[in-house]
Structure formats: C-alpha cells, structure tokens
Amino acid sequence: MADTTRVAKEGEIWVVGGGKGGTGKTFITSSTGTTLAKRGRRVVMVDMDIGGANLHSFFGISRPQKSLTSFFESGTRLADLAVDTDLPNMSLITGDIHSIASDTIRFSQKLKLFRQIMKLNVQNVLIDLGAGSHANTLDTFLIADRMIIVLTPEVIAIENMYHFVKNSLFRKVKLTLKEYGFKEIVQHIWDRRQSYGIKNLKDLIDYLKDSFSYIRTILDNELAGFRIHLVVNMVRNNQDILLGTSIKSVLTKYLGVPILYSGYVEYNDVVWKSVRERKQFMLNYTATGCARQVETVVENILNGREVNVPGGYA
Ligand SMILES: Nc1ncnc2c1ncn2[C@@H]1O[C@H](COP(=O)(O)OP(=O)(O)OP(=O)(O)O)[C@@H](O)[C@H]1O
Ligand SMILES: [Mg+2]
C-alpha cells in the first residue's frame, strides 16, 4: 500500500481505531475533525466502519444522500461523495450503511479506495474505523500519518486495544518484509517463538533486526511512522486518567512502538444527548469539560505532545 503517490502532499491522514466497540471512536473522530476545521483546516471525514456506519449521526444527518455504497457499487469517485456539514471547510463521506461486513470489500476496491483517500484535496482526512481487527480495518489503520487509539477504562477495552495494536504492528512488519521475500520467515519464527526465546512482538522485531542487518534498516525506516496517539475516553476519576500512563508503558514494553498519551475525555451525558438532538458536539457544547479536553487532545496530537496527568508525568 505504500506505493501510492499522494497528490494532496500537505495533507495528513488521521485514523481513529481501537478494537473494542462503543469506546467512542466515532465521537472522537467527529469532534477531532470539527476541532481541526474550527482551526481553519480543510477537513474531510470518512466513515470506514463497514457494517456499522454512523459517523453521519454525529453531524445531525439521519439519512445520508450519498455514501460509500456508490463507490463500491457504481465506482463513483470518492471526492464526489463528500456531503456538506455546518462548517464550510468540513465535509463528510458517509459510510456504506447497506454492507453488513468488512470482508465484502475486494482487494482491488480497497487499493482504489486508499488511493483516492490519499488524493483527497484537503489538509486533514479523518477516518473512523469500526470495531474488531479485520484485515481491512488493520490495513486502513496502517495508511495513517497519525494513528489514534481510543479506549475506555475497562478491562475488555484494554485487551481489545492491545490486540488491535499488536495485530496492526505484526501486519505492518509482515507486509514490509513481504517485498523482500521475508514474510514466511517472519511467520515461521513467530510460530516457533518459544524456541527462539521470543516472548512478544518487540522481541521478534529485535530478533529480526539483530539477525539480518539489512532488515534493521528496512524496519527502522518503515516503522518510524508507527506511532500511536492514545486517548482514554469516558474517564470518571483520576485513576481512569492515570490508566493512560500505565497502558503507554505496557505497549512500549511488549510492542516496542512509541506511544504518546495525547489526552483523556471525561464521561458526560451531554455527549450522547447531542447525538440524539442532532447537534454536532464541538459546535454546540463548547463550554463543557469534554469539549476542552478534545481541544487538548487535538493540540497534543498536532504538536506531538502528551497530556499532563494529575499527580504524575505522562
Ligand atoms: N465521553 C463520553 N461521554 C458520554 N458518552 C459518550 C462519550 N463518548 C462517547 N459516548 C457515547 O457512547 C456511545 C458510543 O460512542 P461511539 O459511537 O463514538 O463509539 P464507537 O467506538 O464508535 O462504537 P462502534 O465500535 O460501535 O463504532 C455513543 O452513544 C456516544 O454518544
Ligand atoms: Mg463507531
């Protein structure tokens, strides 16, 4: 997928994922996109939650006039599918609400979609992913310039998120080395990892780098952009906030990839009520703590910074 030439060179693709359903991925996509647009950026959001598309609901749109369905079924260009929102510099490509599963997308369609996403003439593309670790979901996550992970302070969300990041990284390693005829070797070593003394993905990557010198350069280059921006959503207390810091160290230890704890957003009933009222949250509830926290998240992502954690250092 890395061979695609970008037309909109100054543009950045932000992808929001996380594995578990219902953690607030769509809320964070919609509010992050709106925040960037409020700062004057040209933004388009793409709903890639095949089977559960609902990004339009966060913009008060109940029945989208155009959707990705036309891209898949009649080959309409992606750029022609953008629908207007309340901000002139922000548009939305709504999801395919007819499809029931991500695996209905053919490989060639996926590549065509990625090519067209990369050519969207905007400063920020924001992609909302569905739950789960389907190959199509992982591949979409991997085209990102900024990878955003949303999780909630609950055990299942943390576990799913860990598997999602691990699977994405493993796929990235395999796809990178496939070009050099190494894909099977990587899988072979991983399948017999005990006998190689490999305990986790970080060990595997270190093993590959140490054993094959030219692989080190390739992996260092290709994994340089694999940097996660972590957002903990629906926090209710300081303990929930601190969770971001511990998750960061776990992911660094076992996966070896850089993680930035970009911020947290508190639980507030106003969030789901705004969807019911068909009001975009970041345009109508700017005085809430949630809105300010989303702004901090965006600020931190843009500047590669981390959030200040109460009573500790992020
Ligand atoms: N910080 C919050 N406080 C209160 N409610 C929230 C918050 N964030 C999200 N919600 C609500 O939680 C529900 C799930 O959020 P959302 O749809 O964004 O999750 P998701 O991760 O996209 O789910 P799915 O995996 O099904 O796509 C929605 O009703 C949303 O309005
Ligand atoms: Mg969603």
Image (tube, rainbow, N blue to C red):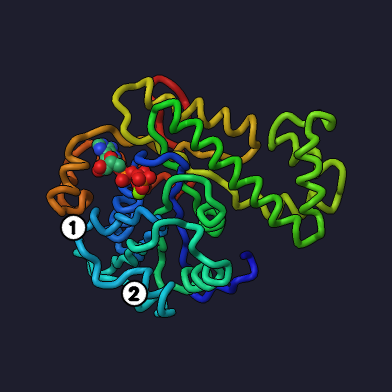
Residue position for label 2: 81
Residue 144 in view in this figure: no
Residue position for label 1: 60
Element type where label 1 sits in the image: loop
Q: Is residue 287 left or right of residue 290?
A: left
Identify which amino acid the numbered label 2 is placed on: Leu
Mark 2 vs 1: CB contact within 8 A: no
Q: Residues within 10 Å of mark 1 (few under 14, many from 20)?
A: some
Between 198 and 313, the residue placed more toward the observer is: 198
Residue 80 position within the rendered picture, expressed as x and y whole percent measured from the top left: 35, 78
Q: Residue at x 66, y 50 (%)?
A: 223
Residue 144 position within the rendered picture, expressed as x and y whole percent measured from the top left: 52, 57
Residue 307 position within the rendered picture, expressed as x and y whole percent measured from the top left: 41, 35
- On the image, which quarter does residue 78 sit in? bottom left
Q: Is residue 226 left or right of residue 243?
A: right
Number of callouts in the render? 2
Q: Residue at x 60, y 52 (%)?
A: 225
Q: Residue at x 56, y 42 (%)?
A: 165
Q: Is residue 47 above or below residue 286?
A: below
Q: Is mark 2 within 8 Å of ligand 2?
A: no
Q: Is mark 1 within 8 Å of ligand 1?
A: no
